[in-house]
Image (cartoon, grey):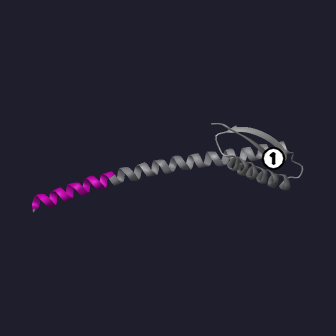
Amino acid sequence: MKNKCSINISGIQLTVHTDYEDAFVGALAENVTEQMNAILQASPRSSKLDAALLLLLDLTDQNARMEAENGRLKRELETLRLDLEIQRIENEKLTADDNGQA
């Protein structure tokens, strides 16, 4: 069920329809406001639009890096699963050989 949530980002009032709780969306809005304010303090000549676009660019970069890291970790996990399966099979063979010799 969609939740209608009013938020304020850097002085701009917005209403969003979301599946998330008001508190979560509000926390996201506060985080965005804090990051935009940091950009505006570092670059006083920047407009709110400039700050929003710079923040968007930075978050897009972070997302791309995290997606790449996630892909790398998934491949590493799959390699480790295959290594574990190989070790399990080798262990079964050794156990079978030991049982056959007894």
Residue at 25% across / 55% down in the picture? 90
Q: Nearer the viewer, residue 65 or 30?
A: 30
Q: Nearer the viewer, residue 96 or 29?
A: 29
User: Main SS of the magenta segment?
Assistant: helix
Q: Position of residue 50 (x, y in %)?
A: 82, 44
Q: Position of residue 95 (x, y in %)?
A: 19, 59
Horizontal side of 55 relative to 75 (left or right) equals: right
Please report the bounds of the magenta region as a residue range. Answer: 85-101
Name the outermost residue toward the right.
45
Q: Nearer the viewer, residue 11 or 56?
A: 11
Q: Residue 89 magenta-drawn?
A: yes
Crowding near the residue tagged with mark 1, few <14, some 14–19, many ≥20 C-alpha atoms within 10 Å: many
Q: Position of residue 82 (x, y in %)?
A: 36, 50
User: In the picture, which quadrant includes the N terminus?
Assistant: top right
Residue at 88% across / 52% down in the picture? 44
Q: How many marks?
A: 1
Horizontal side of 43 relative to 18 (left or right) equals: right
Q: Residue 31 magenta-drawn?
A: no
Q: Nearer the viewer, residue 72 or 1?
A: 1
Residue with the mark numbered 1: 51
Residue at 81% across / 52% down in the picture? 39
Residue at 40% across / 53% down in the picture? 80
Q: Position of residue 71 (x, y in %)?
A: 52, 46
Q: Quadrant of residue 34?
A: bottom right
User: In the picture, which quadrant includes the C terminus?
Assistant: bottom left
Look at label 1 and name its amino acid.
Answer: Ala
Determine whether the residue tagged by mark 1 lies in a helix, strand or loop.
helix
